[in-house]
Image (cartoon, grey):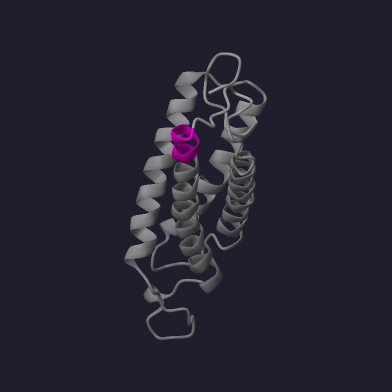
Amino acid sequence: MPESDRPQHTWIPRVIRCIYGIFLIMFIVEGIVGCVYFNDCPRAPSIPVILVFCGFIPVLWGLSRFLNRCNIFFDCLFLYLFFAWFIIGSIIVYSIYEPDYNKNTTDTDHYCNKTLYLSAFCCITLTYVLTGVYVFTYFFALCTNQMVYDDEDRPLLWS
């Protein structure tokens, strides 16, 4: 079928751009919340560290990609580190559901700041949902022959 006769799904690049924008905002918010409430979760003190790491590392990686400062080694390194930290963070955050939000109780070891915990919980859940939408969109574009390629024949959905 000629390319001009093919149905064009203009929503695919829009969905991908929207997902990237939500991820960028979410990562920045994660990093800020992790920094602000860094010592406010004795129940799981690693939650703020995970938020800071999962918040600022992808932003730095994206910046380095934008400035063309990374090579394939650093891309893989960032990807594996982020994936490992994200899985570890998911296990930690979901395992203490739902902590005690009242700081004035006698057992302060079970306390976790409500803003910190709920932002970690929501960001992790939203990351799973957005990743699912991205994968669905990618495979839909692939199956309907709507992939957009760059000059070197690499898939480029966002153009």
Quarter occupied by residue 82: top left
Q: Quadrant of the C terminus?
A: top right
Q: Is residue 28 left or right of residue 1?
A: right
Residue at image x 64%, y 51%?
25
**Which residues make up the magenta segment?**
138-144
Q: Is residue 140 magenta?
A: yes
The residue positioned 59% from the left and 59% from the top of the image is 33
On screen, residue 35 above or below 113: above
Please name the predominant secondary structure of the magenta segment in the image.
helix
The residue that appears at 64% across and 43% down in the rendered structure is: 14
The answer to which of 74 and 34 lies nearer the viewer is 74
Q: Nearer the viewer, residue 74 or 22?
A: 22
For this orientation, the residue located farthest to the bottom is 105
Q: Toward the viewer: 48 or 12?
A: 12
Give above or below for 56 relative to 49: above
Q: Looking at the picture, how far across and down is residue 55, in whole percent?
A: 55, 48
Describe residue 120's horizontal placement relative to residue 19 as left or right. Answer: left
Please, is residue 132 above or below residue 33 in the view?
Answer: above
Instruction: List x then y, in percent, for residue 157.
Output: 57, 32
Q: Quadrant of residue 12?
A: top right
Residue sitting at 54 percent across and 40 percent down? 57
Where in the figure is residue 35, as x and y percent of width and height?
A: 59, 55
The image position of residue 70, as x and y in percent, is: 56, 21
Q: Is residue 87 magenta?
A: no
